[in-house]
Amino acid sequence: MLALSIGGSLLLFAYRAPSLEGGGLFSPISRESGLLLNNLFLTTSAAIVLFGTLYPLFLEGITGEKISVGPPFFNISFTPIGLMLGSTMAIGPYLKWKKADIAGILSRIKFLIFVSLGVSLFVWYLKTSGPVFAIVGVGVSFWLFTATLFEWMDRVKLINKDYSDIFKRIRSQPRSANGMTIAHLGMSFIILGVVGSSAWKEEVIGFVEKGSQLQVASFLVTFGGVSLYQGPNYNSEKATVKVEKDGKFLENLYPERRSYLATGTSTTESAIRQSLAGDLYVTISEPANNKFKGKWVLRLIYEPLVNFIWLGASFLALGGIISITDKRYKVGRTFKYRRTKPANKVVRLDNF
Amino acid sequence: MNHLKLFFITFFYLVPMGSSMAVEPDEVLTDSKLESRARDISTNVRCVVCQNEPIDTSNSGVARDLRILIRERLLAGDSNKEVFKYLVDRYGNFILFKPPLTLSTVLLWFMPLLVFTLGVIILAGALKKASPLKRSKTFSVSNKKKLDVLENEKEKD
Amino acid sequence: MRRFVFLTPLALSLTIGAFAVWGLLNDRNPSEIPSALINRSVPNFDLLPLPGLNSPGLSKKELLNLEKVSVVNFFASWCLPCRAEHQSFIKLSRNDDIELVGINYKDNDKDALDWLTELGNPYTYVGNDFSGRTGIDWGITGVPETFIVNKNGKVVHRFSGPLVGERFEEFKELLMLELK
C-alpha cells in the first residue's frame, strides 16, 4: 500500500513536474528568497532525521556492520541548522515580495540584535555552567521574539503613537499576516523551551525515609512517607511529598508505585508540579540494592522552561490555522460564483 | 507557514532525553564532576538488552552493572575516551549512541553538510533564474530601457 | 536531461524501500549484535569455583594451557532457556575432544548448586561470576550465551540464546569444523 501511494505520487511528480512553469521573477533578497531559504533549512533538517534514522539499516545491509545512531548525532547535526533558522526567521516578516531592502531593515532593527546579544551575555553571567548552544539559543529566541513583535507593532503603527485607529488597524490585518506573527512567536518559545529544559535540567536522587529532605533547584522537598491504597485493578503505594520554596509551602505531591493485579507488572506514576518557569517531577521507587531495603528512592527532576515548548507548539498550530483560513486562499469560491466566464482575480500578496 | 508544522514534528524527535529514572542513589559518586561525567557517558551508551535505551534510563540489571563499572573506571582515572574504548572493546560500536567517525560513518557525519551545500547550490540556481536579466552583460540598450520602465512601474505598487 | 532530475525522489524512495524490505524479510534479528570478541584472544578472567561443586574454577591462563577446542557457556539457575538447553550440554559432555566450561552468571551459590545437582553437571570447569563482571568482559547480552574457542584460545563464534533444535545443529556443525 505504501509502495502504491508513495511510489504512485512520486511517479506522477516525475512525469508532470517538468511541464510546470517556473514562478515569477524576484530579487535575490526578497520574501520569495526568504521562503526558499526557509525550505532549505527545513529540508536539511528532514534529511538529517531521515538519513540518520535509516543509516544503521543501510550500513548493515551493505557491510554487515551494526552501529547505533542516537541523540548525540541528531543534536550535533541539527543545532546549527535550528539556530540559523531561528535567526533568519526573525527577518522574514520584514521582507517585501519581489525586492527587499535588507540594509534598511537591518539598520532599523539592529538595536534588537544588540539587546539580544546583551541577553545572551547576561545569561552567560547567570549560568556559568552549561553548553554554549544554550547561551546562543536564548539570544536567538529573544531576537526572534522581539523582531517579530516589533514588525507587528510597526505594521499596526503602534510605534507611531497614533492610537486613534489602532484597534481598527489591528483587526484589519490579513489573517495570513497574523498567522505568521503568531507562528514566529511560537517558534521563539519552542527554542527557549528546548534550550532551558535540556541545558539547565537538574536532577537529585536520594534514599529517603519519613522526614528526609532533598533540595533541587530552589525547592525544598520533604518525604512524608508512603501509604497503601487499592485502585480499581491495582495496588498502590502512594507517597506524600511536601514542596517548599524560600520557606513558603507550595503544595503536596503524590507520586505512586502501582502493581497491576492481572499482569503483575508495576508502573511508576510521577507527580508533577507545572509552571511556566519549569516542571518539577517527583517519583519514588524501591532500591535495587537489598542493602537499602526499607528505604525508598526519591527522584526529583527539575526541567526549566519546558512548558514553553508546548506553548510554542500551540502557537505554531494556531498560526497555521489562522493562516489557512485567510479568505484569499479560498480558490473554490471563484468556482462557485462563476456565471459565464471566470473572473480574472489577481491575488495581491505583497501588501503586508 | 505550514513549513513550521514540519519543523515542529522533526523538532519533537530531537528534544533530548536526559533525566534518569534509573540511576540509584548508591551509584552516585560523591565527586560531582566525576558523577556528571559518568552521567554524560551513560546517556551515550546503549543498553544492549533493551530497545534503543541508554543505560542511564534503563532499569535492567546489565545497565546498572555498566553504570557502576563506568564509575569505577572514572575513579581509576580513565578519561571519557578510555571508558568508551573499554566498552567498545567488549560490545563493539553498536553500544555507542554517537557513532565514531570511521570510514563507514564518514557519509553519515558529513551528510548534513552535503545536503545543505547541495541545497545552497540549488537555491543559488533558483535565485539566478528568478533575476537573470540584470546579470547579462550582453543585454541590449533598448532592452535595458524597457526593463527600467517596467521596474519603475513595479516600484509604484 | 532535466526530466531525469525529477525522477530522483522516486529513485530515492525505491532505494529506501528496498532496504526496508530487506530489513523486514530476512530472518535477521535487529537486536542481535555481532560479538566484538570474534577472532580475538579470550578476555582475561580468573574465576573461583562454586562452593560445594566438584568442578574446579578456571582462569584464562589455564584455558589456554589446555590447548583444546573449548565451549564456554554462560548460564544461571534463574534463567529458563538455560534449563531448556541443558540437555544439549549433557550430550556434548560425552565428547572428549572438547572442553566444556560453564560460567555461572550473577547467581546465588546455593541455587546454582541445586540446579546443577538436579539437572546434572556437564562442565569440566565451572567459574563463579557472581558480580557479572566476567559477563561484561565477554560482552554478553544475556543468558544463555555460548562461545566456541579454538585450540589457540581465540573466540571464533558466539551464540545468543538456548542451543536447542536447529540452533544446536548449527552449533554442532561449526564446532566440528573447529575440531578438524
Image: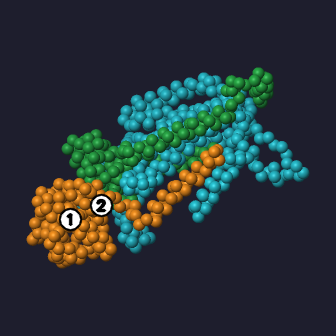
Q: Residue at x 52, y 44 (%)?
A: A45
Chain identifier for the cyan-coloured part of the image:
A
**Residue type beneath disc 2:** Thr
Residue B143: image quadrant is: top right
Q: Amino acid at mark 1?
A: Val
Q: Is residue A300 above or below residue A177?
A: below
At x 62%, y 48%, the residue is C4
Q: Which mark is residue C72?
A: 1
State whether residue A294 is above or below residue A156.
Answer: below
Image coords of residue C106 (percent x, y): 22, 63
Nearer to us in this view, A216 or A176: A176
Res. C141 mark: 2
Q: Is residue C74 visible?
A: no
Q: What is the chain identity of the residue bearing mark 1?
A: C
- Categorize mark 2 by other alpha carbons within 10 Å: few (<14), some (14-19), many (20+): many
Give the farthest residue toward the top: B141
Q: Position of residue A19 (x, y in %)?
A: 71, 47
Q: Spot the orange chain and give its letter.
A: C
Q: Is residue B100 above or below residue A114?
A: below
As drawn, the residue found furthest toward the right would be A340
Which label belongs to residue C13?
Answer: none
Q: Is residue B79 visible?
A: yes
Q: Chain of mark 2?
A: C
x, y percentage for residue C136? 24, 56
For marks 2 and 1, give the CA distance: 15 Å
Q: In the picture, one chain is green; tell me its letter.
A: B
Q: Is residue A228 left or right of residue C98?
A: right
Residue name at image x 39 percent, y 52 percent: A68
> Earlier along the polypeptide chain: callout 2 or callout 1?
1
**Toward the viewer: A195 or A240?**
A195
Question: Can you tell which of label 2 and label 1 is closer to the viewer?
Answer: 1
